[in-house]
Image: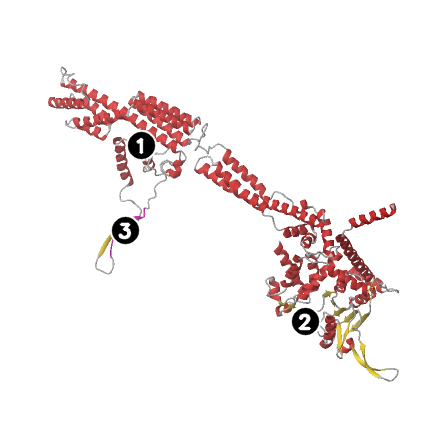
Amino acid sequence: MMASWSYLNALIEQDLAFDPEREMAQTIEASAAKFRTSFSSLKSEIGKVIVGHEGVVQDVLICLFAGGHVLLEGVPGLGKTMLVSTLSQTLHLRFSRIQFTPDLMPADIIGTNVVVENERGQKFVEFQKGPLFANIILADEINRATPKTQSALLEAMQERSVTVGGVRHDLEAPFFVLATQNPIEMEGTYPLPEAQLDRFFFKLKIQYPKMGEAMEILRRTTQREMPQAGHVLDAQGVRELSLILRDIPVATHVQEYALKVLYGTHPTSPHATEMTKRFVKYGASPRGAQAMVLAGKALAILDNRFNVSEHDIRQAALPSLRHRIILNFEGEAEGMDTDAIINDVIRHIQAGKQ
Amino acid sequence: MDAVSTVTSTVRRAATRVAVAASVKHSTQALLLGLGASCIVAAVARFLLQTLPPLSVLLALLLVLPAAIAVWFLTSRPPRGRVAKLVDDRLGLRDRLSSALEFAAAPSKSEAMLAQLADAAQWSASADLRAAFPITLPREAKFVLLGAALLAALVALPLRSGRDAIVGANGPSVGRGQADEVKRLSEEHLDLANKLNSDDLRRLAQQLADIAEKLRSGLLDRKQALAMLSQLMSEAERTAPSAARDKLAQQLKALAAALSRSEATRDIAKSLEKGNLSKAAADLKSLSERLSQLSKSQQEDVAKTLSQASSSAAQRQEGTSEARSESERSQSLIRDLADRISQAERDRALGRFQRDLEMAKHAIAMGSRQKESGKMPGKGWGKGGFKAGFGASNAPQGEASRVEGKTMSERAKGAQGAGPTVEEETLRAQRDDTKSARPYREVYAQYQKQMEEALEREDIPLGYRYRVKRYFEAIKPKE
């Protein structure tokens, strides 16, 4: 009898102590902690192979969890391909590398219907999947392929499915494309059209490693054993973490801030700066604002916050917007960098807040 | 306290600090403005109007605007969202509070919102609002201190600006120049009393000198000075009633009329008519000296005229000197008339003393308003008034007149309209040179003579005579 009474009391106390809001908060806190842990592990594993480029690695991972695609730009030999292949090692995902060449056809990357014969001699058409059917795609030197092939890839990036012979084939999630392109204009390249550049979540610039980093690269790559990155996450893990990211709320004034930055790149907008009016033909599309906010969410979680701040937006502005701004003739002639325009817009907004 | 309460409480406290800081800053600036305006008002009152600055005006200038600004800032708090953003920015909270404030108002809160609120509450509980919103005196505070010191000096220091002002014991002060003027008046009347051998005038002038000394020493304020001057005026009136003076003036007129009948006494009559009693007395003395040199008939004529004059002035001498000779009788009558003229001079001096007292009283009563009204001569704005002033000045006769010497009058002919009419007008034209047609010395001598005659002839108060003489001294041609 006494035991029953004690058990009942314990139940009542437990019930009184239960705070549903706190419980909910603890759940999301645990998820956020998991996000941070996984993120940190991924960076750490990639760091075993890739020396330096911490910012690029972080941005690539943010893109991965935000569900976007990355355009990596850098001169040859800076480890772009190595970065992507290392990322695929850390994620237990299917990885494809497509080397874009001028003679690469859409069917070469999407796949094609082929006539096959079974054991009984019957012939039928079967869809042979191309390298696009993977979780992580490395589109190496994307600007070397013809626009037709580029369009096939970019359409798949947008729709996350391909259609061959009237049959739609969905691409398995996560579907993450990392395209690289060489900034040096060379003969036989086909620069990506502006509308297709807009499909990339981030455009990341890979810089030369610093002297210390180069020394470490030399050390790691000239010994017998090459460093290997371990598995951290699988497809399911990536999908779960992507969902957490989207749960982070954004306050109205932060959204307004992101839109101010966005419209600051529009030459006809009242938020436009003098530099924008002078050098920009078309400003960034709303996808740019989406990218800034989504990336801001990831940055907020990484900073142990559940709110996106204006600082996060500023941090995400350059990779989100730099490939979405189309310069006018004067901007091209002056060799204007879109990063300078974005920084000018941010400075202008900050000065207006003083 | 739950998360929402913690966040809103922090924002409220921050809003209070923001309001107080803004209130302190802006009211200090307003105070500085008020101090500047007060200093200007005080300086104008002290140096131009020579009076103590009106405290009510100064207080209003000082306090009204800062108080209004302080109240406005304290009552109109900034929006909470803006304050929360300020806290975020100043404490580097990365929009935690501003976002939490918005999420707290959301009708349904997601898990992430609740987690964010808990996070924001944790941060806001440890937020150092004192460091984020320090309530300190603005930079203008030191200028406020300087301004306050200046204003205090302008208000508190005695109203003594060089030689221009003295302070009374209990009230508004009397100007130093006014005291000097009273002193000068008393000295002039003392001289006159000695000259005329008038004990009454000497006594009254001495009392006036005592009042002047007290004024110069600051022992009397304006009210007391006016009371003493009124008392002195009453005494002067008792000594020489104005009715008696009028009667004496009538007698002198009758005397002049009587004396004008004889050739020998006509000059005396003229002097009396002009009011030049001194000259009349001198002429009488001269007549007395040359009486014996006159012919018999002339002596009879003089004796008759003097007798009539004496009887017209008073009836007491009739028949008293029947037994004497014509010459003796005339000498007796001359002495009698000389006595009367001397008495008239003394009475006139007493009358002038009363008028001068009246003016002195008026000038002191006017005080600083003298300059403001512009009706009193003296220094500054008082130039050109209708009464003599009592103010110390480096240029008591006022600024020198500016003569536009390069002009001349010239007649010009011309037609007006289309008709045959020819008009002729006198225009001010440019002169070829600035030299006067008549020598200045000659003109001056002529005017100076006229001035002296007028001063002698007319019953002009001492104050006026002094001014006129000073003026002529000022414009005297150089030797």
- Res B276 → quadrant: top left
Q: B297 or B339, which is in the foreground?
A: B339
Q: B379 or B111, which is in the foreground?
A: B111
Residue B418 in view here: yes
Q: Over which residues does the magenta segment extend?
A: B405-415
Q: Determine the secondary structure under disc 2.
A: helix
In the image: residue A280, left or right of residue A24: left
For disc 3, the chain is B
Q: CA distance from mark 2 to mark 1?
A: 105 Å
How far across and how far down the image is residue B219, in percent?
Answer: 44, 26
A13 vs A167: above or below:
above
Q: Amino acid at mark 3?
A: Leu
Residue at image mark 2: A195
How far across and how far down the image is residue B334, in percent?
Answer: 19, 21
Q: B373 or B64, which is in the foreground?
A: B64
Q: Amino acid at mark 2?
A: Ala
For disc 2, the chain is A
Q: Residue furthest bottom?
A: A121
Mark 3 Cα within 10 Å, few/some/many (few <14, many 20+)? few
Residue at image mark 3: B427
Of the two numbered discs 1 and 3 on the same chain, state the one appearing first in sequence. 3
Mark 2 Cα within 10 Å, few/some/many (few <14, many 20+)? few
Q: Determine the secondary structure under disc 3.
A: strand
Q: CA distance from mark 3 to mark 2?
A: 90 Å
Picture residue at 80% right of the left edge, 74% below the top? A131
Residue at image mark 1: B465
